Image (cartoon, rainbow, N blue to C red):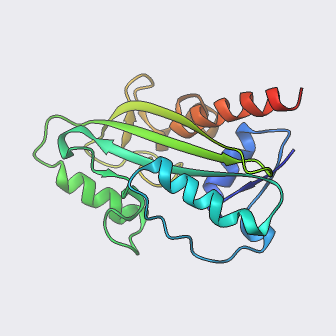
Amino acid sequence: MDIVLASNNKHKLREVREILKGCNIFSLEDIGFYSEIEENGKTIEENALIKVRAVRPYTDKVIIADDTGLFVEVLKGAPGVYSARYAGDDATFADNNKKLLTALEKQSNRKATFRSAIAMQMPDGEEKIFLGEIKGSIAFACAGEHGFGYDPIFYVDESKKTYAQMSEEEKNQYSHRALALLQLKKYLAGQQQ
């Protein structure tokens, strides 16, 4: 099955290709889509739908889009839907991590939840959303060399590691995005029968 992932993020593409083995995953660049998509939804679900709908005029393939948020309990859910731009529109992953660590400096409650919404739009316009979440906490400092985004500071209690300390295979066992993608994979398998 051919699927367009509404992203050019190489980390996400690799993760999606690994989990959806057997499918041909195309990036936005692969289909000639170079526009910026304004993610102005109030939830990660809305943002994921905005992305698939923006890409529809450019392809007749199945389209999927991910939007992810890190929700920190003591910060009343921040950075949440603004996770990618928490430290500003042009913020780097390191900028976002630094801002979050600074915001939690004097906090003992470091509970956090990573949530992913995967929106899917079929060529006939049918839309579905698949959700995945994992609970953990925010580490006191960056740890690990792998991954991207908040991976160096998101500590998965069950594994006793940050995402950045995990191998790709290990992260896919605990990943919020992987959980949502596995639901999508199951749904698509049912469609092909």
> Which of the 4 image quadrants contains residue 23?
top right
Q: Nearer the viewer, residue 126 or 112?
A: 126
Residue at x 15% of width, y 49% of height: 105
Number of numbered discs visible in the structure rendering: 0
Residue 75 placement, left or right of 186: left
In the rendered view of the protein, which quadrant contains the C terminus? Answer: top right
Q: Nearer the viewer, residue 100 or 193?
A: 193
Residue at x 42% of width, y 68% of height: 92
Q: Is residue 136 visible?
A: yes
Residue 121, x across and y down, in percent: 70, 49
Q: Nearer the viewer, residue 28 or 15?
A: 28
The residue at the far left in this view is 106
Residue at x 38% of width, y 65% of height: 85
Residue 182 placement, left or right of 93: right
The vertical placement of 94 against 158, above or below, is below
In the rendered view of the protein, which quadrant contains the N terminus? Answer: top right
Residue 50, x across and y down, in percent: 56, 60
Residue 131 placement, left or right of 30: left
The vertical placement of 126 against 157, above or below, is below
The residue at the far top in this view is 158
Residue at x 14% of width, y 35% of height: 108
Q: Is residue 152 visible?
A: no
> Which of the 4 image quadrants contains residue 178?
top right
